[in-house]
Amino acid sequence: MSSYKNFQDDNFKYSKESSRTNDNPAFNSQVKVNDLKKNSFDDNFNKWVEFVQWARFYPDLWFDLIKPEKGGMRLDLDQRVFLRCLSRFISTYGVFPRGFGKTMIELMSIYHTGVFFPDVNLSMSAQTKENAASISEDKHKELIRKFPLLLNEITKSSFSKDSVEVIFKSGGTYSILANAQSTKGQRRHRLNVEESALLNNELFKDVLEPVVNVPRRTIGEQAVISPYELNGMINFVTTSGYRGSDEFNRILNMIKEMAELKGKIVLGASWELPCHYGRGETRNQLLAKKNDPTTSATAFAMNYESKWVGATDGALVNISKLLKLRTITKAELECPRDKRGNLELNEYVLGVDVARSSAQSNNKTAIVVLKIIRNSEGLIRQIQLVNIIEPPNGLNFKEQSILVKQLFKRYGGNEDLTKSRVKAIVIDGNVIGKGLIDRLLEDVTDPDTNEELGCFDTINTDQKPDHDKAIKIIYDLTATGINDDIIRTFIDYVETEKLKLLKVNDEIKKTSVHGDDSLVIEEQARLHTQRLIDEISNLKLKKTQKSITVEQVQRKIDKDRYSALAYALYYIFLFLEKEIEETNMYEEDDSIVYF
């Protein structure tokens, strides 16, 4: 900063001397104005070099320099450290909470690089291009509002739904990419990965890491690669994720490399740091949110406390594989119909884990809807978790039974089981679940529509329903003695990637195939999918000499959604997988000719 002030002072003196000289007619006749300008630059060339070096190394002080006298943006100490790290290290991993201002600092670093490195190509990548474009446009407007002089460094800026182009007067460019296979083959000089906790290492190695393979060349006559430039820079900015994930392991490796002085650095902070500087929500607001019984403990730990959650050792499944299963873009709130208005020929299995409590903090009833996808030979290729429903706490068993029967109808359930799209309703029949099964075996009328919802019967018990024409659709699952098989079946469906989950959060476009009124319900299904992942990440295997069980790392995190899913998958494995195998076996037997 002092060198720049010295440059200003010297330049001011030169201007005064030149103005006095201009009064001399003899001088004007001998020196051209262009020569004066040239001499001005040449005479101060070393100071310009020193200024550029200073500005590249102190991006926060450069932003202070161009900040307007009134307004602008005041950078706090923690933000200055983060901004300097983004400019000085070959790779920075920042794990910060909501409200920290990390994306704003990230874009400030990108624009600063675009100004001071001619012809540099920069990109930010996010889960989708739409998400990256939305973030970029919002922060660009804020940045220009805070630092209006930046407009003098920008030739063009254009933003659309899924693209961004900012061209700097230096020749540098800024654009966006998606964390997807569509990015393969793209080339940039530097890359910033937004919400990197959602990455998997396979995608990173195959798609994102090669993006920065080609270094920037200087714009002089020689066009050389500067040995002092941080070519191939990749920065990661995110809230925290799950222990055992690829990104968790990347951070551990980067911490080791940081200790070995390999040009990498890892930074992190909880909500208390931005709160100390008065950014984001107040301490009272955040503590109230943390203590709210409706707030997910896992979600708060990741979004605000920057804690990597889940089991460290002995996890139930590989969390990276579980996250990879999120491929479904649309929730199914009912069985879809074809163009003629007929129900599509789908197969559904409903899984129910039963609870009854009026306290929000206690376990809750969870209902999962699994859609079975078969190949041309009838073998199951995918089991899609298309919806998760969590009834309000406090519902009695009769009210819960009405909800289950409504779902049965909604997903194409039929009294004629040969035509029914719902193949089974699997219910945890241990203790509390018996109460729900008893109610399902009774005739009931929908109190809202006055529609007769019918009477159900169990497939595998001797319980008597209200009448003989009841639909045999309830599978009363008692986990005692078969818990090992249930757990192994769940692990197998995850490991083989047959199970597919809904995409969550920013990975999907905010559109609905069912209409605007159902968008909230679809968002709830995706929210429950995220909480399902939270539950599974909180489970670890506990092995004894005779059996295996699952154990919660944190007791306050429920496992109801996991249980409902595991029960339904076990039923599919036990009956629907083998049903096709047996059918194929009989078909082969029929082809045998006996003499």
Image (cartoon, helix red, strand yellow):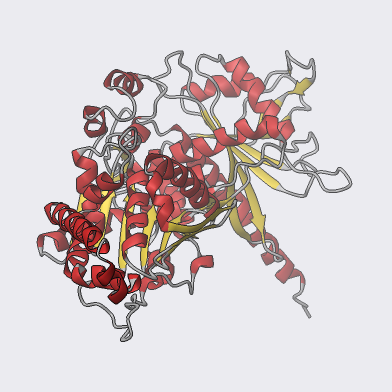
Q: Where is residue 131 in the image (x, y as percent from the top left)?
A: 51, 49
Q: In this view, does 471 lie to the left or right of 369?
A: right
Quarter-of-image position of residue 214: bottom left
Occupied quadrant, residue 308: top left
Do we see residue 155 in this rendering? yes
Foreground: 214 or 158? 158
- Image coordinates of residue 464 in percent, x first then y, are 66, 23
Number of numbered callouts drawn: 0
Q: Residue at x 64, y 23 (%)?
A: 403
Q: Residue pushed farthest right?
A: 340
For the residue pair 537 and 573, the one nearer the viewer reads as: 537
The quarter holding residue 80 reads top left
Image spot of residue 552 (x, y percent): 31, 36
In front here: 468 or 165?
Answer: 165
**Nearest to the observer: residue 441 or residue 185:** 185
Residue at the front extreme, as displayed: 25
Judged left or right of residue 403, residue 409 is right
What residue sits 50% from the left and 36% below the top? Answer: 527
**Residue at 55% in and 57% down:** 163
Left or right of 235 on screen, residue 21:
left
Q: Can residue 245 be seen in this view?
A: no
Tell me where residue 327 appears, x and y as whole percent.
55, 54
Quadrant the C terminus occupies:
bottom right
The residue located at (69%, 47%) in the rendering is: 347
